[in-house]
Image (cartoon, rainbow, N blue to C red):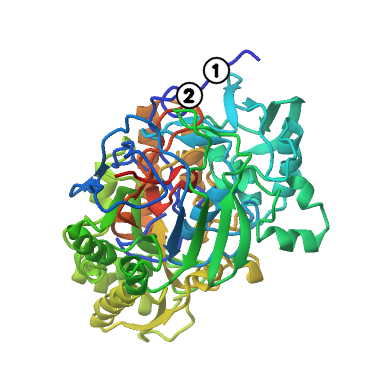
């Protein structure tokens, strides 16, 4: 097919790509929790993590291996190995929450879940270190001139873990399942995808209803981009669909196979002996013989489990825990792999629920809040800067105008807005003129999040105009409250802690800003036609300054309407027992270095034990 090989900035190997995971720019990866200590779903800057290759591997973790240095940004660095890592050994990761399921098209997912999914499934494309997109299952792709038809070539010789060969028809059959998937249907609609056809044994053609220049970014994410065996989930077979949640053998092409799924305790995986990938030295991947994932919601207990040797790795998206882990790592017994990119903490207002349907209330509550105090409560003082938008300062889409427009602390202005609402005889909450507002703020029950909510409560109650109730639910419940599957996706939340941002392109999928009636990923339920039109226009071109100007206009609308809010930027980390590495040095199918470990998500198929 004649056409454009890629959008030079967004899809070429040397480009930089970004994604808003916010309610305002793109489909979220569904990550809960608030504050500058959290991570994950809509605009993203270049990753700040360097992507080094680590020491030669063996199956043991040696006592003499040097720990990779970590800078204040932070960034990990190691020396390139003279020979490739070798196979062997096992690893165990303590994750912050259990996965609701391991079906990319169906199950809402956040950072802990992605660690597991990426071990079972391969994406069609992956991101390079600089954020652009490169080959994985897909080897190459081309679009027509208006980016409405994308032709993708697939790797030859890829099989599922039960030996079933992967063909173009597999991808086409996946689309039948994805069209009704709880996680994938909204992404399909927002990305303008209307058809997937096998146009050759290993050639797939994607047809879109409208222009989507960054479409390939959609094929890097689980809902549409993770390859699964559709034959295991035939239409109408509820038992097969339920079984797929545990990722049975044959469901994926990835480096590991699930051997034991003990929900809320551990998920165990063994290496796929027939995995199709090799490293740059010709060694078959994965390196590890096995990997297991252990949900430990309490941050302190999770870090202690690493220090005690109960597990060999732990993830954290909390600034206070990173601070503690850095201290524990000072003797060299723990290696730190930190990442600080586009992600930030904050929250959202469910605008379908009074009084949050009124912008005076939303802006008033944010004007009454000191971001620095929230960041301090989260343990991020000296680590996180206040955030004002879904783009980090290192992003070409970051806007100084949006930063200036974001409502900072102004007590008098806050009181004026809130008084104007409560004294309005037509106030939307049905209360009498002059009655205080009743608001409910919810975060997961992490100690730092509880502390942050208490600080917010103090600020809001100090106005004398607000009664604030605090609630705390486990992460899975917190996510499902926002998703609202039981009430037509209206959500069962009011003010909800949330994480904003990822490292993907902001234009591939705008489901986070689509009308809530059609998009379960619009968690705040706020939809502004002008805002949405700007986002749609931004994906009709590959010109970065043009896109940046459009995103700035969209960001200014958000800063005025405040359906979502921010605390501070997020550092995330994977901390490991000395010698367990590979998180910064994993490669794409063409041998180029990948993006690293945003949101504490490791590519476990290329993790290994270093040699002495």
* Camera-nearest residue between 167 and 340: 167
Q: Position of residue 326 (x, y in %)?
A: 22, 60
Q: CA distance from mark 2 to mark 1?
A: 7 Å
Q: Is residue 245 left or right of residue 338?
A: right
**Which residue lies at the image location 22% right of the left edge and 64% below the top edge?**
328
> What mark, if any, has residue 322 been given in the picture?
none
Q: Quadrant of residue 324?
A: bottom left
Q: Is residue 253 left or right of residue 431?
A: right
Question: How many callouts does the rendering have?
Answer: 2
Q: Secondary structure at mark 2?
A: loop
Q: Is residue 266 left or right of residue 367?
A: right
Q: Position of residue 80 (x, y in %)?
A: 30, 33
* Camera-nearest residue between 232 and 604: 604
Q: Secondary structure at mark 1?
A: loop
* Camera-nearest residue between 114 and 268: 268
**Which residue lies at the image location 65% right of the left edge and 51% below the top edge?**
105
Q: Would you call the spot at circle 1 few (<14 residues within 10 Å), some (14-19), or many (20 or more)?
A: some
Where 424 sits versus 80, above or below? below
Where 539 sits versus 575, above or below? above
Where 237 sits versus 194, above or below? below
Tell me the quadrant of the picture where the C terminus can be found: top left
Q: Position of residue 479 (x, y in %)?
A: 51, 67
> What mark, if any, has residue 4 been given in the picture?
1
**Which residue lies at the image location 51% right of the left edge and 41% below the top edge?**
533
Residue 514, can we see it?
no
Which residue is the site of mark 2? Answer: 7
Q: Position of residue 550 (x, y in %)?
A: 40, 36
Tell me the quadrant of the picture where the N terminus can be found: top right
* Camera-nearest residue between 78 and 42: 78
Residue 230, can we see it?
yes
Whether residues under marks 2 and 1 lie with C-beta atoms below 8 angstroms apart, the answer is: yes
Q: Quadrant of residue 424?
A: bottom left
């Amino acid at each position: 097919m004649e056409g454009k090989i890629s959008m030079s900035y967004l899809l070429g190997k040397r480009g930089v790509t970004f994604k808003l995971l916010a309610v305002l720019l793109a489909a979220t990866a569904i990550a809960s929790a608030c504050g500058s200590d959290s991570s994950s779903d809509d605009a993203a800057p270049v990753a700040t993590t360097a992507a080094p290759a680590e020491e030669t591997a063996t199956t043991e973790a040696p006592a003499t291996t040097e720990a990779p240095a970590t800078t204040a940004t932070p960034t990990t660095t190691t020396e390139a190995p003279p020979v490739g890592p070798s196979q062997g050994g096992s690893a165990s990761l303590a994750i912050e929450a259990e996965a609701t399921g391991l079906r990319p098209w169906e199950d809402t997912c956040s950072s802990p879940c992605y660690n597991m999914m990426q071990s079972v499934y391969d994406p069609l494309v992956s991101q390079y270190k600089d954020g652009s997109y490169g080959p994985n299952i897909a080897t190459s792709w081309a679009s027509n001139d208006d980016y409405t038809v994308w032709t993708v070539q697939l790797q030859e010789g890829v099989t599922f873990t039960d030996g079933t060969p992967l063909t173009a028809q597999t991808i086409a059959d996946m689309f039948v399942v994805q069209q009704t998937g709880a996680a994938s249907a909204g992404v399909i609609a927002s990305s303008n995808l209307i058809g997937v056809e096998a146009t050759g044994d290993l050639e797939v053609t994607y047809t879109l209803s409208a222009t989507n220049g960054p479409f390939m970014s959609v094929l890097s994410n689980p809902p549409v981009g993770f390859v699964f065996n559709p034959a295991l989930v035939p239409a109408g077979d509820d038992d097969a669909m339920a079984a797929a949640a545990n990722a049975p053998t044959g469901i994926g092409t990835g480096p590991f196979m699930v051997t034991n799924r003990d929900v809320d305790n551990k998920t165990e995986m063994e290496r796929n002996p027939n995995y199709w990938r090799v490293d740059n030295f010709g060694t078959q991947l994965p390196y590890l013989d096995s990997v297991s994932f252990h949900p430990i919601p309490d941050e302190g207990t999770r870090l202690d489990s690493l220090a005690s040797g109960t597990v060999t790795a732990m993830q954290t998206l909390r600034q206070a825990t990173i601070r503690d882990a850095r201290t524990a790592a000072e003797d060299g017994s723990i290696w730190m792999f930190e990442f600080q990119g586009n992600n930030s903490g904050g929250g959202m207002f469910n605008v379908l629920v009074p009084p949050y349907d009124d912008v005076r209330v939303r802006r008033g509550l944010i004007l009454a809040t000191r971001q620095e105090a929230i960041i301090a409560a989260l343990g991020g003082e000296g680590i996180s800067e206040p955030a004002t938008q879904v783009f980090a300062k290192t992003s070409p889409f970051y806007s100084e105008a949006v930063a200036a427009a974001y409502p900072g602390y102004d007590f008098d202005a806050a009181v004026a807005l809130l008084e104007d609402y409560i004294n309005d005889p037509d106030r939307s909450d049905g209360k009498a003129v002059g009655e205080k507002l009743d608001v409910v703020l919810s975060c997961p029950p992490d100690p730092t999040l509880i502390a942050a909510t208490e600080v917010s409560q103090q600020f809001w109650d100090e106005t004398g105009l607000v009664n604030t109730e605090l609630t705390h639910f486990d992460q899975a419940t917190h996510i499902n409250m926002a998703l609202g599957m039981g009430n037509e996706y209206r959500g069962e939340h009011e003010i909800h802690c949330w994480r904003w941002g990822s490292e993907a392109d902001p234009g591939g999928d705008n489901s986070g800003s689509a009308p809530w009636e059609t998009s379960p990923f619009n968690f705040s339920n706020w939809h502004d036609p002008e805002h949405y039109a700007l986002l749609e226009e931004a994906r009709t071109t590959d010109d970065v300054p043009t896109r940046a100007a459009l995103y700035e206009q969209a960001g200014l609308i958000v800063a005025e309407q405040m359906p979502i809010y921010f605390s501070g930027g997020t550092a995330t980390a994977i901390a490991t027992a000395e010698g367990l590495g590979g998180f910064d040095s994993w490669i794409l199918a063409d041998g180029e270095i990948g993006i690293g470990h945003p949101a504490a998500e490791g590519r476990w198929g290329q993790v290994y034990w270093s040699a002495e």
